Image (cartoon, coloured by chain):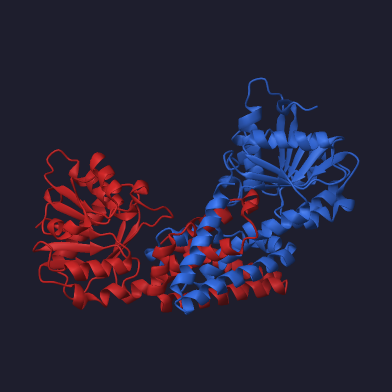
Chain colours: A blue, B red
Amino acid sequence: MHSFSNLVYGFAGLGIMGGSFAKAIRAKILDSPDAAGKILALDSNTATLATAIERGIIDEAFEPEDTAAMLKRCDVVFICLYPTKTIEFLKKYRGDFKKGAIVSDISGVKTSIMESLPDILHDNIDFICGHPMAGSEKEGFYHSSEHIFEGRNYILTPHHANRRENILFFKRLAGILGFSRITETDYKQHDHKIAFTSQLCHIIASAIVDSAEDEKITAFGGGSFEDLTRIAMINAPLWTELFLANRKELLAHIESFKLSLEKITDLIRRSDSGGLCETLEAVRLKRIEMSTI
Amino acid sequence: MHSFSNLVYGFAGLGIMGGSFAKAIRAKILDSPDAAGKILALDSNTATLATAIERGIIDEAFEPEDTAAMLKRCDVVFICLYPTKTIEFLKKYRGDFKKGAIVSDISGVKTSIMESLPDILHDNIDFICGHPMAGSEKEGFYHSSEHIFEGRNYILTPHHANRRENILFFKRLAGILGFSRITETDYKQHDHKIAFTSQLCHIIASAIVDSAEDEKITAFGGGSFEDLTRIAMINAPLWTELFLANRKELLAHIESFKLSLEKITDLIRRSDSGGLCETLEAVRLKRIEMSTI
């Protein structure tokens, strides 16, 4: 149905994720000599839009009041906003998309969006709920890059109204943009797993930094502290939303992490050298197995 | 006093650290055309010694029974063994070193070694207690590299018997090998700080992996989980020694980490969006400040 290089791509939000998608589409699809497609984008930051135009990343820029005018021209729309803003946007503009458009989001939590589907879906569009797992502690268009998706995971959480051909189209597009593993899963499963691999890790990194006695501690860093806490340079408003939107799953993982921490701490407390070594060896093997999957 | 390129360097232990030091000395000092120095090494693994000879990293190999014969020829000796083995080695061979030799260790915990000084020191040697902070989840000579020290921290914990000129010599040597920040500090301070930046991080990484429901979780990984748990591919016997040798400091840091974790968890539990965002923002600024030190 679609030829990637002749489509009009639209972006609502041109931060690090929207910017990276736009740059990847430009570099990997629309830079080819016979491409006739375009990239349109809207953002509340006019300086970002000007830069994106100037650098040849987007073809046309729109301010928020022209959202409907942009949407009606786009074949594929990426909504690259915070989770709650994404839901608001879809509710407000559901009737303004081009007929047959494929629309996707980037939210790191899926339940709140999937449970809003009755207020979001529209006959004109196929809304594919997705989570491109290419986070960074950096923010904004300035830090966006066409390379950040390379080798990354992309999780889709399809629903009853999705057309199979559009899901397959979207997966092919994700592959072209660099993602190496594009998985479909149930949205509740997604939020359960993500609460562990992503949110718990951000909480832990933040707690390590919070518990640091002073900022000069890095004179004693050997790489471990730096690696474990890089993500503590966190986008606070975004992650506050993500944590609270997935609160129940996250709290459950924090509790089981605390049990594991307590188990290891207790071995140290009791100077149980044999038990400690055995536990660490089991952890080592488990982590090595994870690397090979 | 010393010209780096004309010295005889000795290694007790040619694992990842000993191997990396030997490779760095070879590449950065002894590969120069006018160098007359040598590298001698002993290891219980004869295959490692054979490889190191064959690859031109070391000049002469010694088996453990020839330790004294090797030591009496070396100007600078790196003891690259586990902490308890390091103390045993120094006690056993303290009288066998060449007069005026500089001897150093690599142990990640300093109190146990520094408190053994009366049994370790000898008029013939200047023992400089040091911690090259260039750890890795990898092990063995096979994974050693002359590059692992680049940009890393090296902590020295001098004592009353050290000669100032030797400390300065050793710091220059460390700089040549690639370390970017070579600090002198009190050994108790070292163990207090290291319990946080290194040991606590290893415990936390291990607890995250321990609490993972299954090994397939990496299909939902976006980089955070991988970065936070790479060090859980831990050398279990070595880290068991390190954790227990620094048990008291480590337990104190675990407790304060748990308080920070509980503080953040409680904000999530109470869905306190304002308080959570404020805490995460403070963490973000603290971590950014750490990066600039």
- Closer to us: A253 or A21: A253
Q: Quadrant of the N terminus of chain A?
A: top right
Q: Is residue B201 above or below residue B138?
A: below
Q: Please provide percent x and percent y for residue A221.
A: 40, 62
Q: Is residue B191 above or below residue A181?
A: below
Q: Please provide percent x and percent y for residue B56.
A: 23, 40
Which residue is rendered at x = 81% and y = 33% of the image?
A165
Q: Is residue B206 above or below residue A288?
A: below
Q: Confirm whether residue B288 shows in the render.
A: yes
- Closer to us: B247 or B2: B247
Q: Please provide percent x and percent y for residue A113.
A: 80, 54
- Closer to us: B67 or A176: B67
> Toward which corner of the image does residue B59 lie, by quadrant?
top left
**For the view shown, which residue lies furthest in the top direction?**
A34
Q: Confirm whether residue B186 shows in the render.
A: no
Which residue is rendered at x = 85% and y = 55% of the image?
A116
- Could you tell whether A233 is left or right of A218 in the image? right
Which residue is rendered at x = 76% and y = 57% of the image?
A84
**For the view shown, which residue lies furthest in the front direction?**
B65
- Closer to us: A58 or A228: A228
- Could you tell whether A292 is left or right of B65 in the image? right
Q: Please provide percent x and percent y for residue A239.
A: 66, 61
Please state the total of marks drawn on the protein image. 0
